[in-house]
Image: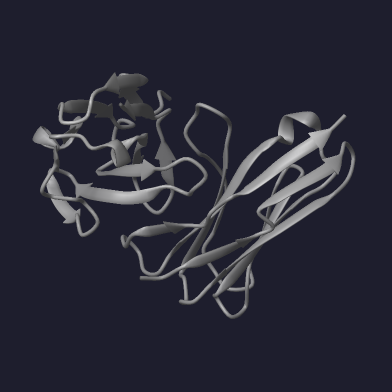
Amino acid sequence: GQQLNQSPQSMFIQEGEDVSMNCTSSSIFNTWLWYKQDPGEGPVLLIALYKAGELTSNGRLTAQFGITRKDSFLNISASIPSDVGIYFCAGQETSGSRLTFGEGTQLTVNP
Amino acid sequence: EAGVAQSPRYKIIEKRQSVAFWCNPISGHATLYWYQQILGQGPKLLIQFQNNGVVDDSQLPKDRFSAERLKGVDSTLKIQPAKLEDSAVYLCASSFWYEQYFGPGTRLTVT
């Protein structure tokens, strides 16, 4: 089956710094989703991307759907302590097909 | 709008026992998903329902796992008998279109 490589696995940053993480796939995806998961909770949808080249923002978060349709990145600007958590990318090959998740990026923000 | 509800939140059982999890999706969402999330990994799809029909159960260990969605709303996931390696968080998600929304999950510990 398709695999998603998400990097980095973990990041330790200072409050106020910008953060970037990305996902690459062995397959072409039609949809990319980015989620954040806090301890003891389910993943929360942050941003959804539907077209190659699409750049979408949600507050301090910006995500892009790669032109090749095999990658996506997420940027967080001016990080704050509540940004701490695990960020997952997820991709879908066709509408209604299985969502494949990356392994996650653990973000730690030092105040 | 109420989110995806799951119960119980935590369950501890001994190996070879059985366990059941319940999920109530967001109102109006026709598609319901059950995921297994092992510690340190991204969620993995177990089964996907469209209304009360199964769309994808290719990754469900059918010798011990079963799921149903009667009347196309609530769903239950059962494990019988449980093994040690079933220890994980079981997440339920629902969607109206592409974007999946997750419940808080049930943390299962098998001893």
Q: Residue furthest bottom?
A: A68
Q: Tell me, yes or no, if residue B25 can be seen here.
A: yes
Q: Is residue A54 above or below residue A17?
A: below
| Relative to A52, B68 lies left or right | left
| Relative to B78, A9 lies left or right | right
Residue at the spot 63% in from the left edge and 72% down from the top edge: A66
For the residue pair B78 and A93, the one nearer the viewer reads as B78
Give residue B81's position: percent from left, percent from top.
Answer: 14, 34
Q: Is residue B59 above or below residue B86?
A: below
Which image quarter is the C terminus of chain A in?
top right
Q: Tell me, yes or no, if residue A55 can be seen here.
A: no
Q: Is residue B35 above or below residue B104?
A: below
In which quarter of the view is residue B26 placed?
A: top left
| Relative to A108, B21 lies left or right | left
In which quarter of the view is residue B7 placed?
A: top left
For the residue pair B5 and B107, the one nearer the viewer reads as B107
Residue at the spot 30% in from the left edge and 32% down from the top edge: B25
| Relative to A66, A108 lies left or right | right
Residue at the spot 20% in from the left edge and 49% down from the top edge: B50
Give residue A55's position: percent from left, percent from top.
Answer: 68, 63
Colouring scheme, one of rainbow, by chain, secondary structure, one colour: one colour
Which image quarter is the N terminus of chain A in?
bottom left
Give residue B29's position: percent from left, percent from top.
Answer: 30, 39
Residue at the spot 71% in from the left edge and 42% down from the top edge: A107
Give residue B39's position: percent from left, percent from top.
Answer: 47, 40
